[in-house]
Amino acid sequence: MVKLRGAITAMVTPMNADGSVDYDGFRENVIFQLENGIDAIAPLGTTGETPCLEESEEEKMIKIAVDEAKKFFEKTGKKVPVMIGTGSNNTKDALRYTHRAKELGADVALVVTPYYNKPSDEGIFEHYKAVSSVGIPILVYNIQGRTGKNISTPLLKRIAELPNIIGVKEASGNIEQMMSVIAQIKNKKADFSVLSGDDSLTLPLLALGGDGVVSVVSNLAPSIVAQMVHAALDGKIDEARKIHYRLLPFFKAAFVDGNPTSIKYAMNFKGMKAGAVRLPLVEVREDAKKIIQDAIKECDL
């Protein structure tokens, strides 16, 4: 079973000027991540604008990510897992997307809490029970701010006992809840990964015993985020804290006008492949552009 640990990039989906997916740009970004020390890549999540992508576009992106990760392994001997977002508020669709990820060679499926429907705890449990039967490692994605439902620790304990559930991306923003997840689940199940879903809370979570981060900021600065995470995992807290405070202005700026609009603007500003966003997302405000540019300069990125 895959053990997720370290710095994982929640990848953007680059767009061409006409609004189509820039597949060459995506491949370039994947290679950049692999060559700059990232521990796993996560296309087709929130940061990847997945709700606005066609299934045919998603399939091409999965194939590119898996292909480049395979080439990197053959070249270096380093296995970098590919984690694909397969969540939906329709369990039938989540099953289909998860099967597709498995069939195309992904290593892990990232499955968000069913959104909008606001199911009961039992409904959430049955949803994860269904997708866990696909036979690919599953990372639970808990983000109440986007789904309207929090996965409480008692509920996550039940989900964690299902086959193929390997951990949680904790984006509740609640440190107390994260501590309870570590104390009640991870400390009793060593192979269960607890990953931060918020860049700014990565170091606090690592200091409490977490395993890493699914990062937005690492789209732009994979090597620096990876250095911070690995320093903390190695017990070098002073070194990790120094990097944390170096990056703190950009941790804030990367979300100043929403995600992925802010990180895409930052990447474009630095000459990386990101492009525009698709409606209903729009380009960041003019005042936000200055905040992002100033943070990039302040953090020396």
Image (spheres, rainbow, N blue to C red):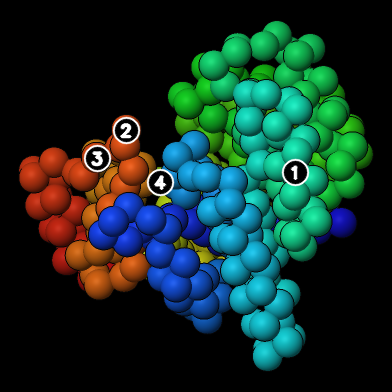
Whether residue 76 is visible to the viewer of this picture, yes or no, is yes
Give, as a three-letter code, the residue at label 4. Ser
User: What residue is pinned by disc 2?
Assistant: 280
Which one is earlier in the sequence, the residue at label 1 or at label 2? Answer: 1
Q: CA distance from mark 2 to mark 4?
A: 26 Å
Check disc 4 and report the residue beneath it: 200
Residue 38 position, x and y percent, is 55, 69
Above or below, 244 against 149 in this view is below
Location of the N terminus by quadrant is: bottom right
Up-down: is 59 above or below 25? above
Classify residue 68 by image quadrant. Answer: bottom right
Determine crowd level at label 3: few under 14, some 14-19, many 20+ residues with C-alpha closer than 10 A. Answer: few
Badge 2: few (under 14), some or many (20 or more) residues near its Cα, within 10 Å?
A: few
- How far is the residue under mark 3 from the one under mark 4? 24 Å
Q: Is label 4 in a helix, a strand or a loop?
A: helix
Q: Secondary structure at mark 2?
A: loop
Q: Residue furthest bottom?
A: 75
Indicate whether 21 appears above or below 181.
Answer: below
Residue 222 located left or right of residue 289: right
Amino acid at dot 3: Val
| Image quarter of the C terminus | bottom left
> Is 282 placed above or below 70 here?
above
Q: Position of residue 84 (x, y in %)?
A: 65, 52
Residue at image mark 1: 98
Label 2 with label 3: CB-CB less than 8 Å: yes
- Residue 282 numbered mark, or none: 3
**Could you tell me how far apart the alpha carbons at marks 2 and 3 are, in whole angstroms?**
7 Å
Circle 1 residues within 10 Å: few <14, some 14–19, many ≥20: many
Secondary element at tag 1: helix
- Which badge, 4 or 1, comes first in the chain's sequence? 1
SS under mark 3: loop
Q: Give the alpha-carbon distance from disc 4 to disc 1, as whole Å.
A: 29 Å
